[in-house]
Image (cartoon, rainbow, N blue to C red):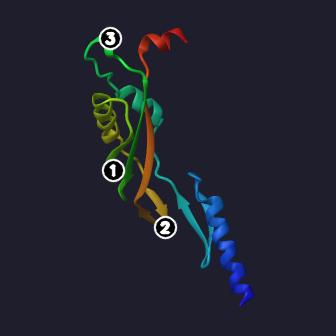
């Protein structure tokens, strides 16, 4: 009985410790070691977002800077679904961040037990005016 309890505690602690990694990692399960890998985006996600992002312009006096945080799910073939703004700036900025998030496609989905799975991703989308980038 003590042996089973010890294995159970070890299993839970390993899942807690290693549960936040994004790389291919071995987790200890009560059945043995399992493999987990995150979805793979071809290229640099931050560069992709920066390239596709268009600043919503009403007039130059109302331009904002900040970050819109978007969540979405990556399905079993690498498409992003169920997009949602977690923290927004203003409606037009939120809509632009959602538009860019819907363009994201992953080359490979997340894998667990050798099979593709659906996982949630949270991505910050930063709005920075170009003149401020050039000054830095």
> If you read the primary sequence from the N terminus, does the residue marked by circle 3 or circle 2 appear first?
3
Q: Nearer the viewer, residue 127 or 103?
A: 127
Is residue 72 placed above or below 89 in the rendered structure?
Answer: below
Q: Is residue 51 left or right of residue 17?
A: left
Instruction: Give SS at disc 1.
Output: loop
Instruction: Give SS at disc 2.
Output: loop
Q: Which residue is mark 2?
A: 114
| Crowding at mark 1 (Cα within 10 Å: few <14, some 14-19, many 20+) | some
Q: Which mark, residue 79?
A: 1
* Corner quadrant of residue 124: top left
Point out the frontmost of discs 2 and 1. 1
Q: Is residue 128 left or right of residue 96?
A: right
Q: Which residue is mark 3?
A: 61
Q: Kindly check if marks 3 and 1 are in contact, taking CB atoms under 8 A apart as contact.
A: no
> If you read the primary sequence from the N terminus, does the residue marked by circle 2 or circle 1 appear first?
1
* Residue 6 x %, y %: 72, 80
Is residue 56 placed above or below 109 in the rendered structure?
Answer: above
Image point 38% across, 20% down: which residue? Answer: 64
Is residue 47 placed above or below 27 in the rendered structure?
Answer: above
* Corner quadrant of residue 104: top left
Point out the frontmost of discs 3 and 1. 3
| Crowding at mark 3 (Cα within 10 Å: few <14, some 14-19, many 20+) | few
Q: Kindly check if marks 3 and 2 are in contact, taking CB atoms under 8 A apart as contact.
A: no
* Residue 69 x %, y %: 42, 38
> If you read the primary sequence from the N terminus, does the residue marked by circle 3 or circle 1 appear first?
3
* Residue 81 x %, y %: 31, 51
């Amino acid at each position: 009985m003590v042996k089973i309890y010890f294995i159970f505690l070890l299993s839970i602690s390993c899942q807690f410790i290693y549960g936040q990694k994004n790389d291919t990692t071995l987790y200890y399960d009560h059945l043995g070691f399992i493999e987990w890998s995150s979805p793979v985006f071809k290229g640099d996600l931050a560069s992709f977002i920066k390239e596709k992002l268009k600043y919503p312009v009403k007039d130059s006096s109302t331009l904002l800077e900040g970050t819109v945080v978007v969540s979405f799910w990556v399905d079993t073939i690498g498409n992003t679904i169920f997009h949602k703004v977690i923290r927004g700036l203003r409606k037009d900025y939120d809509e632009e961040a959602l538009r860019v998030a819907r363009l994201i496609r992953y080359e490979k989905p997340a894998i667990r037990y050798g099979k593709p799975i659906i996982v949630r991703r949270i991505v910050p989308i930063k709005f920075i005016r170009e003149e401020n980038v050039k000054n830095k």
